Amino acid sequence: MTELAATSSRLTIDYRNATAGAVGEEHGVSPAMLAEVASKVREEHARIAAEHAAGGQRWMNLPDDLALADEIAAFAEQARSRYQDYLLIGIGGSSLGAIATIAALADPYRNLLPDDRRGGPRFFVLDNPDPEKVRATLEVVDLEHTLVNVVTKSGQTAETMANFLVARQALEAVVGKQRASEQIVATTDPKEGLLRKLADEEGYRTFPVPPGVDGRQTVLSAVGMLPAALCGVDIHGLLRGAAAMRERCRGDDVLTNPAYLLAAIAVLADTRLGKSMLVTMPYADALYGVADWFRQLWAESLGKRLSVSGEEVFAGQTPIKALGAIDQHSQIQLYTEGPNDKLIALVAVERCRARVEIGGTPAGTPELAYLQGAELGQLLDRERLATAWALTEARRPNLTIAAPEIDAAVVGELFFLHQLQTVMAGALYGVNPFGQPGVEAGKNATYALMGREGYEGLRDDLLAEPEGGSHFTLVPV
Ligand code: PA5
C-alpha cells in the first residue's frame, strides 16, 4: 500500500481586516468576543474528539483510506487508456467535490487537448436533469468509448437516477446490454439502496460511498477521488494535504486552530455583527469550484430550523461565491457600498502555475506603460490586495486565506479546513451540521409529484386544494 510521506500545512490565514481594530467595533470581531467564545470552542472540540474516538465524525478518517486510494488509482490508470470520454452522473455532494477538484487541478481546457496531452478521458457531468444539456452531452460523447460513473449515496435521488436511466439506455443502444454493464461504474452505499441493488443485478463495478458520512463530506472518498484520478489528479497528494490540515487542527485553541478560528469569526460576524452572508472570493479561476463546493457545505450543514435541543432557531449564514477579479466588476460595488451584512473571505494564491508577462505596450499609448513588463498573476494578486484595502476602508470585514500555489495537497488542505470549520460552526450555532431534512423534504415531494409508489399520501397532501385554489399545476408525465 502507498505510504503517505508526511507533509505540512501550507495555508495561511490573515484575519486582521475582520477585526474591530480594522473595521470598527460595530463590524469587526474583537479580541474580547474571541475570548468569550474560546471556552465553548474548547468544550465542543472535546465533544467532537470524543465522538470521533467513539466511531463518529467518520469524515475525518477519509484521508487515511490509502487502500481505497490505491484501488482507485489502479482502476483509473487502466480506464484512462481505455476510454475516450468519462460521464459523471450525480448531484450536490455527489458531484460538487469532484468538479471542484478537477477544476482546481486539471488543465482548464483539458477536454479540448489532444489525446496524448490530456492523459485520460474527456470529462462531462450530468447533474441537473435539464433535457437540453443532457441531450447535448449524450450527442457529444463517444458512447462506444465512454465510462459512465453514476454517483449517489442514497441510491435513489430522482435527478441522478433519471439522468442515469437516460444515459444507460443511450449506452445500451450503442454497445448492447452486456458491454454497457461493463462500462458503468456505480459509486454508492456498500450495502443499501436502489442503485446498489441494480449494480448487483447488472454486475457493475462499484466503489463505496462511506456509510456515516453525509454526501457533502465525501469529496475525499471514492465520490471525489475516482473522477479526480480519471482526470489525472494526484489523489494521494489530496489525501496528504487533508491529513496535514487535520494534524494542524489538533488543538482546541480558537486562535491557533485555523478551522476553529474561521468558524468563530464567521459565526460571531453573523450572530453578533449582523453579517448574515459569507462571501468566498478566490483570486484564481481554478479555485472557483472549491468556493462552489464550500457554498453547498456551509448552506446544507448550517441552515437548520431546529437547534440540537429542539428549539426553533432558523440558523445559518448565506454562503456566496464570487471570483476575483471578475466580480470586482460586478459584486464589489454592492459589497463595499451596499448593506454591511457580509463577511468576505478572499483566497490568495502566491505563485500561479503559469507566468504570463505583459509586453508590447504601444509607444503611442503611454497611459498603458504601467502594465509593460508586469505579469498577469501579479496584476491579479494586486487586485486582491486592492479589494481587501477597499473593503477595509469601507469598514467591511474581510479575511484572506492564502495558498503558496495550487496543487493537490493545497486543495486537500482546503477541503479538510472547510469541513472542520463547518462542523465547529454548527457547534457554535448550536445546530447539528449533519443531515439535511430540508433537502430530504424536497426529494420526497418530488417523488410524490412524479407518482412514485409509496408516496401517495404525500402526493394527496401536496395536491389538496387549499382555500383559494391549488398551489400546484402538474404537467402530465
Ligand atoms: O450533502 C448531501 O447529503 C446532499 O447534497 C446529497 O449529496 C445530494 O442530495 C445527493 O444525494 P445522493 O448522493 O443520495 O444522490
Image (tube, rainbow, N blue to C red):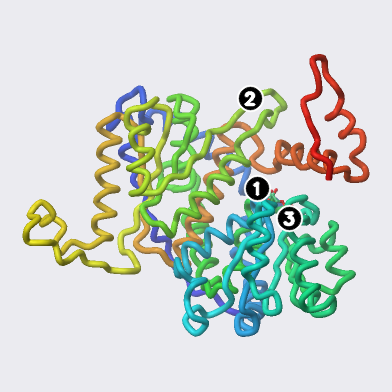
* Residue contact at pointers 2 and 1, CB within 8 angstroms: no
Query: Hey, which residue is sitting farthest top in the picture?
Result: 467
Residue 194 appears in which quarter of the rendering? bottom right
Question: At label 2, which amino acid type do we have?
Answer: Val
Q: Secondary structure at mark 1?
A: helix
Q: CA distance from mark 3 to mark 2?
A: 32 Å
Determine which residue is flagged by label 3: 160
Graded by Cα atoms within 10 Å as few (under 14), some (14 to 19) or many (20 or more), the crowding at tag 2 reads some
Determine which residue is flagged by label 2: 313
Which quadrant holds the C terminus? top right
Q: Which mark is residue 50?
A: 1
Residue 88 appears in which quarter of the rendering? bottom right
Q: Secondary structure at mark 2?
A: strand
Q: CA distance from mark 3 to mark 1?
A: 36 Å
Q: Which of 277 and 313 lies nearest the eye of the viewer?
A: 277
Residue 355, how many percent across, how many down?
27, 68
Name the N-terminal-most of marks 3 and 1: 1
Q: Residue at x 47, y 62 (%)?
A: 104
Which quadrant holds the N terminus? bottom right
Q: CA distance from mark 2 to mark 1?
A: 26 Å
Q: Which mark is residue 91?
A: none
Question: At label 3, which amino acid type do we have?
Answer: Thr
Q: Residue at x 62, y 61 (%)?
A: 125
